[in-house]
Amino acid sequence: MKLKKPYIISVYALVRNEKGEYLLLRRSENSRTNPGKWDLPGGKVDRGETLKEAVAREVQEETGISVNPGGIAGEVTFELPAKKVIAIVYDGGFNVIDVQLSYEHVEYAWVALEEIVKMEALPAYFRNFFKEHALESL
Amino acid sequence: MKLKKPYIISVYALVRNEKGEYLLLRRSENSRTNPGKWDLPGGKVDRGETLKEAVAREVQEETGISVNPGGIAGEVTFELPAKKVIAIVYDGGFNVIDVQLSYEHVEYAWVALEEIVKMEALPAYFRNFFKEHALESL
């Protein structure tokens, strides 16, 4: 079995505010992948972690927010230059506290679903995820 | 956010013999899902388990084989009547010991890739996975 690129598993969270807007983070210009692009909070699953542990840790590290991940909202797969990513997106629930960014991101925003699906600076795989999500919520 | 069906995560293993054939299991006629169909060894991830722990446990339970899951070979998503499944397929490595089935399955077989992609009694989502897998291996 020859695999052209290794797969990794990543986890992301949909965190909403009281208006139902979603939390997006903008990646640093120094990021190896998608520099300057918008992103969901989340990242790679570490060895020995459950998916829920990983999403709670990543959201905490990147935003200072403690989430208690609920159900799975969906999945997204995409290719980066060196790997293929299977991304599991969790419902991260509601949040009302201030966001504290890490070095990985330079900006955050709470964005309504109808705006997200038009954001050119959000990678297409996430935009498509929100489009399907919007259709499912009808 | 209204979700029509909950998502669950399942894990499966590609276990090969010395000829490079893959281990498939045939589900009991009493199975709630896909009765009598062929299947990969694997199943649902339990709460608190890592994906690799889950795949090792499921393969052990269903076949008696101890696998040390390697890299991820790919992913498959499919819908069952009551849920959507995100299935992560691991490379389960080579095996030479006898298979010991559990109550869940009634038969096993080692099947070459060129036969698997034609098996009508293997759900289409797995057949398609093997087709892509075959293309990737070229």
Image (tube, coloured by chain):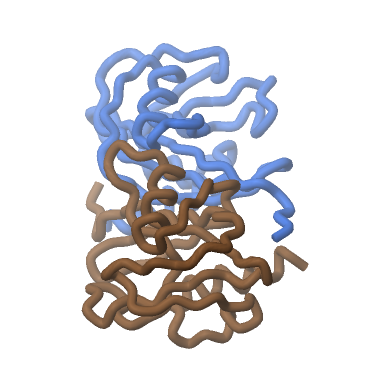
Chain colours: A blue, B brown
Which residue is more in the foreground, A48 or A111?
A48
Residue A126 relative to residue A19: left or right? right
- Whether residue A135 appears in this view of the structure is no
Horizontal and vertical percent position of residue B90 = 53, 53
Q: Is residue A72 above or below residue A48?
A: below
Q: Is residue B10 above or below residue B20?
A: above
Which one is in front, B40 or A115? Answer: B40
Q: Give coordinates of residue A92: x percent, y percent.
A: 31, 33
Farthest right residue? B138
Q: Quadrant of the C terminus of chain B?
A: bottom right
For residue B131, above or below residue B91: below
Residue A104 on image: x %, y %: 57, 19
Left or right: B76 in relation to B72: left
B55 relative to A27 in the view: left or right: left
Residue at coordinates 57% horizontally, 63% vertically from top-left?
B96
How many marks the image carries: the answer is: 0
* Image quadrant in which you'd find residue A11: top left
- x 54%, y 19%: residue: A105
Query: Residue at point 48% right, 62% down?
Result: B76
Query: Does residue B98 sit above or below A45 in this rendering?
Result: below
Residue at point 47% right, 14% down? A101
Point out the residue furthest to the front here: B98
Tell me if I can see residue B124 in this picture: yes
Could you say where residue B83 lies in the image, as x and y percent from the top left? 27, 62
